[in-house]
Image (cartoon, rainbow, N blue to C red):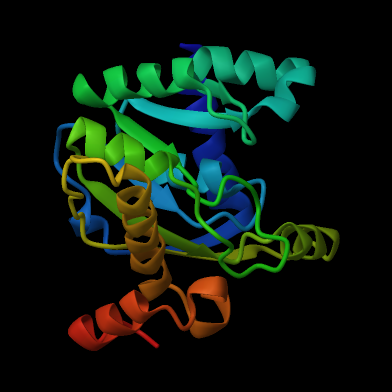
Amino acid sequence: MARFLIRFFIILFFRLFTRVKIYGMEHLPSGGGYIVASNHLGRIDPAVVYAFLDRKDVSLLVAEKYHQYAIARWVVKVLDAVWVDRFGADFQVLRLMLRRLESGGVLVLAPEGTRSPTGALIQGRSGASYLAARAGVPIVPVATTGTEDRVVLERFLRLRRLDITVRVGKPFLLPPLVGKDRDQALQQYTDEIMCQIATLLPPQYRGVYADHPRLIELLQEGGIRD
């Protein structure tokens, strides 16, 4: 019941205080395990993604810094979310996420690991690519705009609704990790994830990946919005 109520109030919040436009919902897999990899502009990003994923087996990763707040601890417990150390390799969390993915669950994460201080993409980390390659599940790239903390605060102070745009890209698979050059492979996989997200973003949001050869290649292949 508590889980249902949290989801209800999240969706109610977005209906009352925001205008959310979502494109590409048809790309979401109809079942099975997969990873949603999104950019990270503001604190409400995970709630935005959680709201449009109509599944009961969604796992969210929550930064350990919020553990000091009782309400955050309660929400994490009810939603069966997972505390994560953003600056260290937590192998226990990795094993837990692998089990959930292999059992058909959905994992929502931001490969950047933290909110972008500029609003544009920063360097991605290898956690998402490692999990996807090990579990053999698809990655669904998602790009969100309009959720920057400063924009949210400014709109609410002016009693104006927040305009949020979410674009869902096509799922893709990463090859299994084999051989000795795993670090190099993980870097390549991480760049692939970040460039796939970048294709869904306006140019000013592409950040460190704006001139990446793989992004240029993807834009040329798909003619994705520019």
Q: Residue at x 78, y 62 (%)?
A: 150
Decide: is 142 above or below 96.
below
Q: Residue at x 17, y 36 (%)?
A: 136
Of the pair 205 and 125, the residue shown nearer to us: 125
Decide: is 222 above or below 67.
below
User: Which image quadrant: the C terminus?
Assistant: bottom left
Decide: is 91 above or below 146.
above
Residue 22 falls in image quadrant: bottom left
**Rendering coords of residue 141 (x, y %):** 34, 57
**Rendering coords of residue 200 (x, y %):** 38, 71
Q: Could you tell whether 169 is left or right of 111 in the image? A: left
Q: Residue at x 24, y 88 (%)?
A: 220
Query: Residue extending furthest right?
Result: 157
Query: Residue extending furthest front?
Result: 180
Residue 80 appears anywhere in the view: no
Of the pair 122 and 147, the residue shown nearer to us: 122
Decide: is 71 above or below 215.
above
Q: Residue at x 41, y 62 (%)?
A: 194
Q: Could you tell whether 109 is left or right of 132 in the image? A: right
Q: How many marks?
A: 0
Residue 92 appears anywhere in the view: yes
Residue 178 falls in image quadrant: top left
Residue 26 falls in image quadrant: bottom left
**Rendering coords of residue 176 (x, y %):** 17, 41
